[in-house]
Amino acid sequence: MTKLSTTVPATFDFAGICFPCSRPHAFGLVLEPPQGGAASGSTSGDYLHEVLLAPAHREAFFAVVAEEGLVVCRGVHTHAPTYRRVRGKSSAVKLSQAEYYHHDGCSSPTKPRIVEIRCPHQDVTRNIATAVAPLPAVIHAMLAALPESLLLDAELNRLRDSFTGPKANHPPPSEWDSIQGKVTRLARRQLDAEGCREYFRHVDTLAGAYVLPWQMGESRLMLNSHPDLTRTMQHRRAYQKPRSETTEQNGSLVKRWPAEELDASTTSGGPFATCGIDD
């Protein structure tokens, strides 16, 4: 059902429809709206729902997201009712939880398979980046980016050294959450807000994070949970420059968990009541 052509320009063939596509980053697949009216499979410009997430195709599309780690759908026009506005606040002197790398649903017994974050069409542009990176790269980068002044803990030194050697010597994935939590708490405790933001910008660079600017009508679907943790992605709200006290208008994002979403008539409860950390 799916095929990525190697011709130039490249196309992604899915459900009998050809989507122009590109790979502007080291990972992830970026899809553009298909052309050709009825041949596009969409009459409203909402190819995400009318084609990719149509009941007959959704699991095949989720398999593509699982394979790629990140699929970006640009130029989508949709009024789907299951999106929820992201929550939480940050300031010049305080980070929100979303500024730390995380999986959605991290406090839930079961994490959602896929997280979709979307920049709706709106009057105000979105100037705050969303960084997305593979979990193994994030853990490695968080340890490698720690300033020497914070590496007073022998265990942290040991962990950092273990990630720089052969993969066979890396800590097992089952320990990654606790390692990440320890490093995050250390950064929060020892660094001021802008020092912590600068640290995580360094992490973004070392992890090779996807931080391309948001476009209106763009949805980013990322693999949030998989039995093989080495394949999962994490994300965070990423300020690309120091924050100031001046209030700067920014476009808003919405999100949802499409693999677990409920029927539109029952979206007042279920997973959307606790949709995870804001972004």
Image: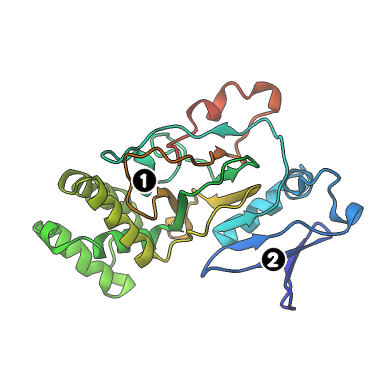
Label 2 crowd (10 A; few <14 / some 14-19 / many >=20): many
Q: What residue sits 81% from the left and 56% below the top?
A: 15
* Mark 2 touches mark 1? (CB < 8 Å): no
Q: Residue 192 in the image: x percent, y percent?
A: 20, 46
Image position of 233 (left or right of 58): left
- Judge whether 54 appears above or below 214 on screen: above
> Where does the N terminus fall, quadrant-wise?
bottom right
Identity, as a three-letter code, of the amino acid under mark 1: Glu
Q: Residue 240 in the image: x percent, y percent?
A: 39, 55
In this view of the protein, which residue sits in the foreground, 217 or 125? 125
Find the residue positioned furthest to the front: 246
Label 1 crowd (10 A; few <14 / some 14-19 / many >=20): many
Q: Residue 195 in the image: x percent, y percent?
A: 23, 52
- Judge whether 162 appears above or below 268 on screen: below
Q: Quadrant of residue 14?
A: bottom right
In this view of the protein, which residue sits in the foreground, 24 or 229? 24
Dot 2 or dot 1, earlier in sequence: 2
- Find numbered disc 1 in the image and state the secondary structure of the residue it sits on: helix
In this view of the protein, which residue sits in the foreground, 246 or 226? 246
Task: Name the mark on residue 21.
Answer: 2
Identity, as a three-letter code, of the amino acid under mark 2: Cys
Task: Name the mark on residue 99.
Answer: 1
Image position of 174 (left or right of 3): left
